[in-house]
């Protein structure tokens, strides 16, 4: 299978290159829009590749010895070591729901980082394929009504700010819980930060005795993990926005042609079909590259949403700050998950919209290309979107299915809720 | 997306206008049938627009300074204030299932009123698009076998009467409960109507001390809220009836042609396809305008049905009148919800029926238009209906899916039923 | 809608009649095969129409004054009176699960009898339409490899015997329970048969004081109700067998043609398509006549299966005979339900099989009719079967869906099982 | 139905034979790849047929009097006798969950062995049909990029080793449990192996008094049962690999043609369509032969997975070895089930991939064959795979559906988990 799909890619790239001379573009390519985002996330050790701010994707270059790659690999090494120590502790001391949830977060974050590293390594190939497919959309006769660059960078900016706020909230509640334990319960160590580490990084403290110098290192790893965990959703959203935009441009051109009978020529419809097929190939190519990330991301979000809502039925939060953090965390998590679902299903919605225009073409202008275009859309109507390794395809209908599954699971779990109010320290001392 | 769909509308309107001279119509347009209904609902502050009883939709006019708009805005203002005060009380005093259910009703009713107001504002645009699409169906060669005007107004009338009866029942049980509390339990105030307000409008009594003159104002708001909540379902039903009728007319003409071989010409099939496509455009256009209302309405009905059936398992109703009200409320609610589901899915059924006629056309009369018409129906066969923001499409299969979800939820919740008989006053004193 | 579908029928009948001279048939028509079955069931007051054993469906005649109709109406009258008295008792004395289950059985049986009576009234119309659609299949070039007459009558015979055995079992356990109560618990009357009636027909005993002469009348009503309840499933199975047979014949002819290139002419494919469309029309026509019966029958079976399996978890059967009756009842019920599901889904399987032959036609013989036939099958592939009022379509996939729903419901209900062993008399004294 | 499908097979075979002269093949046929596997499994009394290692499938021969058949029938006889004695014991002594689970395993294994025996009997017919369908793929212009022989034999080898390890684990834990009971609880017999038999084969010990010579016989039966139970999954996986390979070859050739415009001729597309249809026929033919095995295998795996995960929630394993066995058993079982699901759904994935190439064919090369090929794939897109008697079709989406059903069932069953720690002997003494 793998070498087949690789061959398809090669073939598709070949087909597209032939007979096209690259001209000056009127609108920024996806590479130009997404480059600045990459420049930022490289500070968080993701997508390490040189030349992200260059004008052309030809200047992208992955070098093992570049500072970005070394920085990313350092993080991967430290994070992996930490996850392994954590797993070892879990196996040694037995299952503990609180520690297990944290460990799952570490491991998911590290796997996502590895996937992002691999994407960085292949990014040049990916973005060149993208450029070939989108090239025709960057100049007349296609037009762009929305500012793709602004849309991508604004979306990134907003989600970035939310992620930072969420992390600060997390730190604040952690410090407050630690303070509470020191003053009112039985701390593991009288030193504030040592106790802090004993609570959140017992597996590290077990091997590396406490020194104050470790703290920044641990916080650095933690920030990068949190960012990696957050950014994979944002990344999927941004790619989806980039692809929907092209389908919208194609729809715009089609719709424009419908107003002027002299524009409806066989060659127009041949072009539209060819460009549509290119976009379909683009969606399938990108899906083949990121669907494992989509699967992991959706599965983890799904699991955490169920766990958190289940916890929400329990009356055991420690204080107001913890409560606010808890609810804002749930809302942000659900919001981000919905963001992924909506933006990706928008690819599908945009792609299917073309059917409406085909329907409106008078029969006297009908051509084989229109028929084939219609068949293509019809055949792919449920699958023209990102998928979780083809186990599920993200469309609008999936959102309802997921919501109803979550409600069912919560109702079934309702029986297990133990409503007894627990003592403060039993909540803090772990 | 939004400006694309706006462009489609413009385009579709344009296409339809060209090459059609408006002639005298043999059957009433939807505007003519629906106008009297609008005249009635404007007394309830919905769909405020002038000229609803005029002969032509060209006389419709939305004026900010008209009495209807001012009346509607006054209601929106009062209702919103009340909902905000209620929300404030809920947040201040903590969650209370009884008060929360009432508040959810207020808020849903107000959101529906806002949506209806917006629909009123856009009504001229909507109804003109409708007229363009349905214009060909108002005269020969199309015929109408059913009296659309009667059907719409009768449906409205019946549901209107039910809604009034339901509200009177509600008032009667409220007054009786209030009376019971005054005589047998601990009332909040010895004055009958002050206690009444303390029970049903505590959030208002908190800010505006009791005077008898407030009662009519509160009742006015309440009646309008109840009507708004009811009418949104009726509204969807009436629109669905109006559209199904046109598909039925098209089917009638097709079927009639099948009986006479000399009628089966290429031009007939071209017309049928064009008119069918117009109806598809109409369904999609109306859906884009009302699907948020459909989503809200179905979600709220779904939730209330589950809650009420869950309550039905509990043995705690206060007296016979309360029991009768409770059951008639459930039956009316389920009936209305089924009414929406059936009438909307009838659009889909009627639209798919055309396939049966296409199948019966002998191959010697086969044309490209028939092929394209068949493809259109096939592609849209699941989606040619109103939708809840495209999360779900209302077809007959959805009804079974909803019913089975409700049964599953109830069975799962069965464990939570607490069958202990509670004391009368614990049921009344809230 | 209704008059449209009536018009379709008329139209379809018309189309078929034209250009066909009725010739001698080589194989028995469905009327000939099914007639003897009808002759038997008329003893049970179902499908009352004269001439069921005649050679041609033209001799069928529904006369209000015929002995069969009067007999059937007498039963309908008696049964309805009994059901009304039972309902009255239930409303008067309050809900009782045991009595309610029995009453539901009475009511379902009576509704089924009414539906069967109406089918009897329309039977001539139905069977004539059937004959028109199947006429071409009764002679060369179509061949029949299976003996339809034998298949239908054997199926009926086997299910008939099972139903009788089941009823005898029911009587035996009833008598034994009655005997047990008389000897070991507190009977309602010392007279054996009066106590019997007090147990099983309390609503009748309340109005008509006990005389031994009532017993045969009550037993007659009960036997007819039980038969009506059983036969509706058998009826659906037999109709489904009759239709599948025709699709199989069409498939046989198609397959035969594929072996001889000189048989593959445009006219053959035109004929095959026309005959296929006739069968599609037949399925839709029959479905429109019986789908309410299908819906009622499947819903009742589904409910009873869930209830009975739920009861099976309880350890409370009275004795070995009761145990054997209980299990044989469940097995027979599930078997009959599966019988309906399998035989009806066989229509769908047979109809879709034609696609395999179309695929094998070499492209040089390809014609418009083959293309249209393929489109027809594809479009109808999920719906070419009997339906429950179009809420669900009976295909093989539905069987799995139903099974999984039953398992889910049972697992959810498992919590409610009360495993305490109850005293014998608490099980008998009702 | 049956003789129709038989006729199809005959017809399809005929079509394929005509016009093809068998030439020398460049790649091994499926028979050549699968033969050595058969040679091994015949030691375990499965698929008994002579000539499995021969070069051509023409040398295959099923002889009732051959040693393999007699060996297999001997096993079938012994295994069936044992299952019958076990069933008799269950009915006599009443239901016992532990014994029932074991008995279900015996019965499933024996039914699978019977199905395998029947497959062996028909193997020549099956493998000849396979050869006819795959013949064109064994030489140019088709090429093979993967080593089918290695893939099949390696897959078999790995699963074979796992099965042996699993059985050794099973024996080790059985012996240890037996030892524990002898030393710490109340054994049924002081003799080690007699007690062993009393624990695991009480139904045999009841009829055949203990002698040490029985042990090898019982172990022989048990090994063969375990192997039969395991191998049915492996068998499905290997067949699926064999078919996917052919679709991949076809895709390779198509893709290769897309690179060279002069290769895209009408005759190429006619060939591709014909070969594709042959593969579709192959999938349907093999499915008709093994779908009962698929249904049985998936149903049993599904049931056991649910039971085992349910047991995993209970804290009652006896010792570390039991724990390791328990978890490795679950993991191996889930792994094997996923192996079946993935390899079979790969058929579907490969078959649908062809659509991507069709889409890329420029319109000027478009032919009727391409259109028909596209229609074929579209129509069969959900069903072109192995099925469980058409109740379900194994595609990637099914995997998610199964997983979500398992999770739902486990969550519902969570209530039933009885977490009390039981005494050691209450776990061992059965």
Image: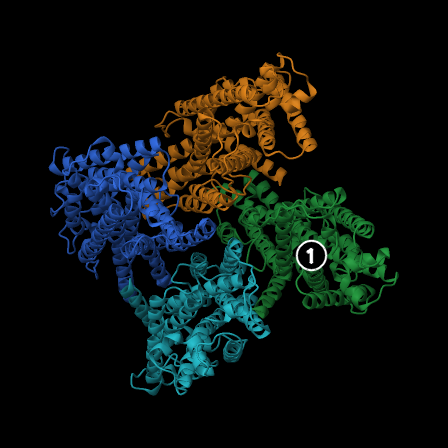
Chain colours: A green, B orange, C blue, D cyan
- At a point 42% along the width and 25% down the height, the residue shown is B155
**Looking at the rendering, in which quadrant would you find the C terminus of chain D?**
bottom left
Residue A176: x, y in percent? 80, 48
**Looking at the rendering, in which quadrant would you find the N terminus of chain D?**
bottom left
Query: Of B164 and A394, which appears nearest the observer?
Result: B164
Residue D256: x, y in percent? 54, 69
Query: Of B339 and A116, which appears nearest the observer?
Result: B339
- At a point 41% along the width and 47% down the height, the residue shown is B371
Please, is residue B22 above or below residue C402 in the view? above
Left or right? Give the position of D124 relative to B111.
Answer: left
Query: Of A211 and B167, which appears nearest the observer?
Result: A211
Residue B411: x, y in percent? 47, 45
Residue underneath mark 1: A98
Please, is residue B195 above or below residue A222 in the view? above
* The quarter of the displayed image where residue C396 is located: bottom left
Left or right? Give the position of A118 relative to D149.
Answer: right
Q: Chain of mark 1?
A: A
Residue C347: x, y in percent? 31, 53
* The quarter of the displayed image where residue C79 is located: top left
Q: Is residue D18 shown to the viewer in this render?
A: no
Farthest residue in the top direction?
B213
Determine the secondary structure under disc 1: helix
Left or right? Give the position of B355 relative to B387.
Answer: left
Please give the count of numbered marks on the rendered protein: 1
Q: Residues within 10 Å of mark 1 (few under 14, many from 20)?
A: few
Left or right? Give the position of A96 relative to C311.
Answer: right
Q: Is residue B201 shown to the viewer in this render?
A: yes
- At a point 64% along the width and 35% down the height, the residue shown is B95
């Amino acid at each position: 299978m793998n070498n087949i799909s690789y061959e398809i890619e090669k073939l598709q790239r070949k087909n597209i290159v032939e007979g096209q001379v690259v001209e000056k573009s009127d609108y920024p390519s996806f590479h130009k829009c997404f480059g600045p985002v990459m420049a930022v996330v490289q500070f968080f050790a993701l997508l390490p590749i040189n030349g992200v701010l260059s004008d052309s994707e030809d200047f992208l270059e992955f070098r093992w010895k570049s500072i970005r790659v070394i920085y990313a690999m350092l993080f991967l090494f430290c994070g992996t070591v930490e996850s392994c120590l954590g797993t070892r502790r879990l196996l040694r001391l037995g299952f503990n729901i609180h520690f297990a949830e944290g460990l799952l977060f570490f491991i998911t974050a590290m796997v996502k980082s590895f996937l992002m590293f691999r994407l960085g390594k292949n990014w040049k190939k990916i973005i060149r394929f993208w450029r070939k497919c989108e090239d025709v959309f960057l100049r007349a006769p296609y037009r762009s009504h929305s500012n793709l660059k602004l849309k991508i960078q604004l979306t990134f900016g907003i989600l970035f700010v939310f992620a930072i706020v969420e992390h600060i909230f997390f730190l604040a509640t952690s410090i407050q819980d630690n303070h509470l334990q020191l003053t009112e319960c039985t701390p593991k160590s009288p030193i504030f930060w040592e106790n802090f580490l004993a609570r959140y990084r017992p597996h590290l403290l077990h091997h590396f005795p406490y020194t104050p110098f470790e703290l920044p290192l641990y916080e650095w790893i933690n920030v990068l993990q949190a960012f990696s965990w957050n950014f994979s959703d944002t990344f999927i959203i941004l790619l989806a926005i980039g692809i929907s935009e092209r389908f919208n441009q194609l729809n715009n051109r089609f719709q424009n042609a419908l107003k002027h009978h002299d524009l409806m020529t066989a060659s127009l419809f041949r072009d539209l079909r060819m460009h549509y097929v290119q976009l379909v190939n683009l969606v399938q190519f990108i899906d083949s590259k990121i669907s494992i990330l989509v699967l992991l991301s959706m599965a983890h979000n799904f699991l955490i949403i169920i766990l958190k809502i289940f916890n929400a039925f329990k009356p055991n939060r420690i204080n107001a700050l913890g409560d606010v953090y808890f609810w804002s965390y749930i809302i942000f998590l659900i919001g981000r998950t919905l963001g992924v679902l909506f933006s990706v299903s928008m690819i599908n919605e945009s792609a299917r919209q073309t059917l409406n225009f085909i329907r409106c073409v008078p029969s006297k202008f009908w051509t084989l290309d229109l028929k084939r275009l219609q068949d293509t859309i019809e055949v792919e109507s449920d699958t023209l979107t990102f998928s979780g390794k083809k186990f599920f395809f993200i469309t609008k209908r999936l959102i309802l299915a997921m919501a109803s599954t979550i409600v069912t699971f919560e109702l079934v779990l309702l029986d297990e809720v133990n409503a007894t109010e627990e003592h403060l320290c039993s909540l803090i001392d772990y």
